[in-house]
Image: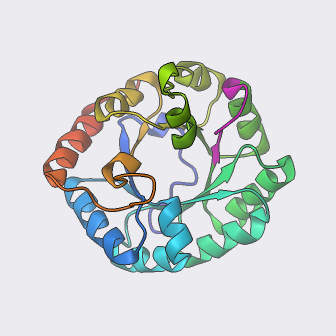
């Protein structure tokens, strides 16, 4: 890895880091978005699930060649075949992979085995868990290096009246675990910027920057560079409270 993040701990997160999710459907758009993100000061770049599905591991190889010093996160949402899938993306140049908490224990453990063997950070996604705090404990117990606290787009859309937000359970998850935590799913820029103060020091700016609707994964119009520069600067200035 060019910029090791596998051993990341909360104690190392003295300030917030910013991860930009490239939730796009082709490598050309991903490179354009990555350039905007990198110029704005983003720390990590994420091969979002749509990009991973559309372009496969080649997306990692292309972005690695263009951004040798930026950690690359592959949001694979692994559910089975954990070792092989993690290995494939690690060998392509990914620095982190995502496994789903709803997978079998054995799958999560095998992804973590690959993480140790290939030096990649394993992020455990708690989407759809009935008890998010207990799920975070389980993911850490099984060996993940980061908990990704996630309220899914479809679920939020189907229950708009509930105003579902990852901020609801975030303090409890931070208190219940010792590994770094991310919070994603429907957060506004202002809400995302607030996450480091809660203890979730890796802030994700994702799909709202790229998804116009459920089927169009495109870079939005508007002054995105300026918006990102301001948001990233504010995250970098926010000290994490441990």
Q: Which residues are magenta?
A: 124-133
Provide residue 60's location: percent of width, then percent of height: 49, 73
Q: Position of residue 145 (x, y in %)?
A: 63, 46
Residue at 55% of width from left, 75% of height from top? Answer: 56
Residue at 61% in and 77% down? 91
Instruction: Judge whether 30 appears above or below 135 on screen.
Output: below
Q: Nearer the viewer, residue 185 or 58?
A: 185
User: Seen in the image, is 38 located left or right of residue 215?
Assistant: left
Q: Is residue 89 above or below residue 136?
A: below
Q: Quadrant of residue 64?
A: bottom left
Prevailing secondary structure of the magenta residues:
loop
Give the camera-side residue of 202 and 132.
132
- Where, by quadrant of the figure, is residue 198 drawn? top left
Q: Is residue 206 visible?
A: no
Which image quadrant is residue 81 in? bottom right
Where's residue 204, x and y in %?
41, 44
């Amino acid at each position: 890895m060019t910029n090791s993040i596998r051993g990341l701990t909360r104690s190392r997160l003295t300030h917030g880091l910013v991860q930009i999710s490239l939730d796009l459907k082709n490598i050309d758009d991903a490179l354009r978005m990555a350039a905007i993100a990198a110029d704005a000061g983003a720390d990590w770049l994420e091969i979002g699930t749509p990009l991973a599905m559309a372009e496969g591991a080649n997306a990692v190889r292309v972005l690695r060649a263009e951004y040798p010093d930026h950690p690359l996160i592959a949001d694979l949402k692994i559910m089975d075949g954990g070792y092989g899938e993690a290995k494939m993306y690690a060998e392509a140049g990914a620095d982190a992979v995502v496994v789903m908490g709803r997978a079998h224990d054995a799958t999560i453990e095998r992804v973590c085995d690959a993480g140790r063997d290939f030096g990649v950070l394993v992020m455990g996604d708690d989407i759809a868990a009935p008890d998010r705090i207990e799920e975070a404990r389980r993911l850490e117990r099984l060996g993940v290096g980061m908990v990704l606290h996630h309220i899914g787009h479809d679920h939020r859309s189907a229950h708009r009246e509930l105003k579902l937000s990852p901020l609801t359970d975030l303090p409890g998850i931070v208190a219940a675990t010792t590994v770094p935590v991310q919070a994603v799913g429907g957060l506004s820029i202002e809400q995302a910027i607030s996450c480091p103060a809660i203890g979730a020091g890796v802030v994700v700016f994702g799909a709202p920057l790229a998804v116009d609707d459920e089927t169009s994964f495109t870079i939005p119009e508007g002054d995105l560079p300026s918006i990102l520069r301001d948001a990233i600067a504010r995250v970098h200035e926010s000290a994490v409270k441990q």
